[in-house]
Structures are given as C-alpha cells and as structure tokens.
Amino acid sequence: MRKAAIVLLTAFVGAVLMTGCNRTANVRQKDEADEKKVLTVFAAASLTETLEQIGKEYEEANPDTEIIFTFDSSGTLKTQIEEGAECDIFISAAQKQMDQLADLIDPATRHDILENKVCLVVPEGNPKSITSYDDMVKHLGDKDILLAMGNEDVPVGQYTQKIFEYFGLDEETLAKDGVLTYGSNVKEVTTQVSEAAVDCGIVYSTDAFSAGLEAVDTATEEMCGRVTYPVAVLKETKHPEEAKAFLDYLDSDDSSAVFESVGFTCLK
C-alpha cells in the first residue's frame, strides 16, 4: 500500500507541476501577444513637430503599436544607421542620405512623401532690413551681416551651398570673412535666428512657420533643386508589417492634413 501511495503521490505532484507549467506557458504567450510592437523611426529634424503629432494620433488608433522617434540631421541619422543603430523606418530630408543607405533599406518601400522649400529668414524686427536673397548676397559682400546655415553634412546646409553656387559665392571665403555660423541640424539654425544671434538664416519653410519666423524670400528650384523627403523601411526591421502599415498611414489623408498645416506639400 505504501508503494501504491507513493506512486499516486508522485503522479499527483507531476500533474500539478505540469498544470503549473502549462499555465505559466499560457501566461507567457498571452503576455507576448499583449506586448506592444515598438517601431523606431529616424527622421529629419524638420519633421519634429508634424511627426510627433502624427505618431500620437497613430498610437491612439493603434494601441498595440508604440512609435519612438529620433530626430536629427539626415546625415547624422544615416551614419548612426550605418553603424548599427536599431531603426525600422528612415525619413530623410534629401535623396543623398537615402541613396547612401541603398544596401540597408527595402527598395520596395522607398518613395517620396513630402516636398519642402528653402527660405531666407530673419529675426524679429529684421534689424538689417534684409528682404531677399539678393540683399543677403550684397550684405555678405559688404561683410556686415552674420548668416546661419547648416553644416555641409546636413541637407539644409547642402541646399544652402547650392544657393551660394547659384549666386557665385565662395563658402570658404565667406567663412574666413567671419560672416557665417553653422548648425548641426536645421533646428539649430532656426534657433540662432529666433534668438537674434544672427542677422538671417537659411532654413526650410516649415521650420520658419513652426518657429514663427519671417521668411523674406524662398529659393527657386533653379537655385537649389527640389527639396523632397524620401522614406523607406530598413531591411533589418523586426516588425516589417507594422512598419509598412505606418508608412501607409504617413500617406493617408489624416497625415497629409498635419503635414500641409505647416507648409509641406504631400507627394502621393
């Protein structure tokens, strides 16, 4: 009888342990199913305000997804991705940086979503009475203004360099003359103008709008080319379906309304 009792007890304990294991496994599976999918989006600094609003609205409509944004110059973000930073979606303020990531992005997802303009902005009161790019060129020649621009690895800085070329200006000479200051992204340039640390700056129209700055002139396509924003999903994303769903949302009417409210032109 003792032997039978031991066998029964062993069977009972085994059944209890098995039930516990099954319950733990079920709970684990449920927790994993309930976990939010986290999408990491690297985006040009000029998209900060609009994407934060769009991301919030998307999360409200899709509670199973969390969007984490990293905003900086497209050049900086491109380098971070090349160095292995975890990223699901990249949105650049220029084609160059996206082209340089051709081996790391899913080409089937790449497309242009937005167009912007490059404008000349001045601080409140416009102390130097600058009213156009022609005025800017004259003052730079007279060495009596300070102009803020993006670094050479920043798209807005590259567009500025094209404007210099259009007007026959030599950036190296201007820098030696002490009439230029630089920003590591467009937000830094915008801040310099907003704080009246400079007499004018070259930024995107959308950043001028968001910062409440006066845009006195807008560069033409002839002056600096088209300012288009490409987007793509990274090949190494852990959530390809969720990433593509968010891209679809960026092309939606709801997102377009947010982008257009600050001056972007939507391309779809």
Image (cartoon, rainbow, N blue to C red):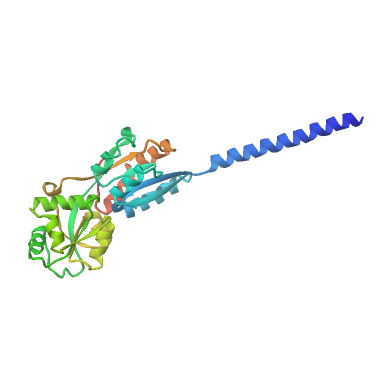
Residue at position x 25%, y 65% in the image? 194
Viewed as shown, does residue 7 lie left or right of 225? right
Asked if one can make out residue 268 in the rendered structure from this viewpoint, the answer is no
Q: Percent from the top left, x then y, of residue 86? A: 41, 44
| Above or below 146: residue 34 | above
Judge by depth and name the residue closer to the eye, 175 or 219: 175
Residue at position x 75%, y 36% in the image? 16
Q: Percent from the top left, x then y, of residue 140? A: 10, 62
The residue most toward the right is 1
Viewed as shown, does residue 58 lie left or right of 146? right
| Above or below 183: residue 248 | above
Residue at position x 18%, y 50% in the image? 159
The residue most toward the front is 176
Q: Percent from the top left, x then y, of residue 33? A: 54, 39
Instruction: Locate the C terminus by quadrant.
Output: top left
Viewed as shown, does residue 60 lie left or right of 16? left
Q: Percent from the top left, x then y, of residue 71? A: 34, 52
| Residue 107 position by quadrant | top left
Total count of labels: 0
Instruction: Locate the N terminus by quadrant.
Output: top right
Asked if one can make out residue 17 in the rendered structure from this viewpoint, the answer is yes
Residue at position x 14%, y 49% in the image? 162
Judge by depth and name the residue closer to the eye, 222 or 80: 80
